[in-house]
Structures are given as structure tokens and as C-alpha cells.
Amino acid sequence: MQNILVVDDDLEIVRLISIYLQNEGFQVTSAQNGKGAIDTIFQKEIDLVVLDIMMPGIDGMEVLRNLREDYTLPVIMLSAKTEDIDKIKGLMTGADDYMIKPFNPLELVARIKSLIRRSYRFKAPAESSEKDVLNLDGLQINKTAHHVTHKGFPISLTVKEFDILYLLASHRGRVFAAEEIFKLVWKENYFASNNTVMAHISNLREKLEGTLGYNIIKTVWGVGYKIEE
């Protein structure tokens, strides 16, 4: 049974989300503030975090930054902020998804299931075949184990960051438009104002550049993104 951590200072929202998740067979752990969330993540086995941004004291963004120093588990952020810049900030900090309050609990559960399926598919024990491991500029990208290493040292990526990197690396030289990346990775229709791909690409570049010293993901202006052959 997967354990979902729900973090929100609004107890009514925590109660509502918990009911829907428990009805779907999930175990639910809750926290009402940032410190409680951080302590819980360090102490318990958590499979996914539903994280509110606006909380007193340590807010959701700070919790996410702390989390991403050591963990790659999926995170869905909740916020009453509707501006694109707030969504971009959350995604660039390392969130895998972002929902605006008020939200449909059934949609939240559907997104949680999607991220959990993807996360567990890559956690499942299996032997890696050669075709599932890509070697790129010193990087080893293992699709089966869902991890990336550079000279033996792991690079911490979110689920979506890994999926984008594997997509581009397995089709080197091909340019993917943001719309196409979104449809292939998120399995959803793309909207004209959607900056999700841009935010994830930016975050992925920052992590890779910190390890390699340069960026392997190139922008083809007006077209999309690619990794050179």
C-alpha cells in the first residue's frame, strides 16, 4: 500500500484529500506545516507528497528545496496562486505537477495514480538490458532502474526530468517541440499557455550543467529542444 503524505495547514483540505485517497486504497500520512512535513519525510517511507505552497513558517517551496537535496519521490504542489510564474517557480524547484485551488479531488487522485504508476514501474526490480541503458557524454541513463549516473555518481532527477532526458537522449539529433514533449511525457493535451516543459527543461539543464560543466540539451529557436548526435 503506497503511503501518500498530504501537507496543508487547512485541516478541511487534508481531511477531504485523505478520504478520497483512502477510498482508492492508499495509506495517508498528514502534516500541517513545513517542519512537520520535513520530519515526516525523513522518518517514514513516503511514496508521493501532496504539498501546499502557502503555509506559515516553512512554506511549501522551502520544503520542496529541502526534499530535493536527497529525494526524487514525486511531488504534486497545491496553491491558490493562479499566475503562470508561480507554477513555473514550483516546477523549476522540482515539483512533478502543480494544481490550483480549488481543485477537483478526483482529478488530484488521477494525477497521483499516474505519478505513482510511473514511479513504481521504474522502481520494480528487473535486469537492465543494453538497449535500456544509454551512454551519453559520460552519463549513463538507465531506463529500467530509472536513474542517471556520471562516472558512477548519481544525479538526482524528478520523474518527469528523467523522462524528458531519456526521450531526447534516445532520439539524438531529433528536435522535439514543447507540445510534443508534453504529450509524450505527461500523456495529456498541451495548452498554448503551458510553460511546464520549459520549466522542467530549465531545471534539468541546471542539474546536468552542475555535473558536466556544460549543457547537452540544445534549444532550436522557434522549434524545440534536442540533444546533438
Image (cartoon, rainbow, N blue to C red):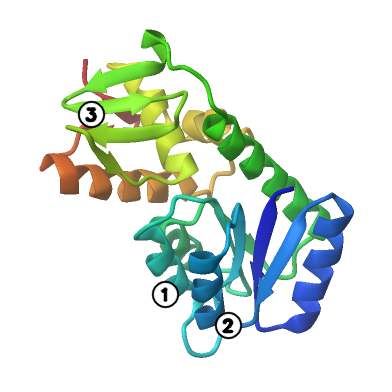
In screen coordinates, is 37 left or right of 221?
Answer: right
Q: Is residue 167 in view?
A: yes
| Percent coordinates x, y for residue 106 in the rendering | 82, 53
Q: Quadrant of residue 212?
A: top left
Q: Is residue 6 above or below residue 179?
A: below
The reply to whether discs 2 and 1 touch (Cβ–Cβ < 8 Å) is no
To which residue does mark 2 refer? 33
Q: Quadrant of the C terminus?
A: top left
Tag shown at residue 139: 3
Of the two numbered discs 2 and 3 on the same chain, state the one appearing first in sequence.
2
Question: In 3D space, how far apart are the residues under numbered discs 2 and 1 (Cα atoms)?
Answer: 11 Å
Residue that appears at 77% across and 75% down = 13
Mark 2 crowd level (few <14, some 14–19, many ≥20, 10 Å Cα): many
**Residue at the (59%, 30%) spot, across then down:** 121
Q: Residue under circle 1?
A: 62
Marks 2 and 3 close (CB-CB < 8 Å): no
Report how far apart the C-alphas of labels 1 and 3 lie in the structure.
29 Å
| Residue 206 to residue 168: above or below | below
In the rendered image, the residue lying farthest to the bottom is: 57
Q: Is 166 placed above or below 3 here?
A: above
Label located before the other in sequence (2 or 1): 2
Residue 40 locus on image (x, y percent): 56, 71
Label located before the other in sequence (1 or 3): 1
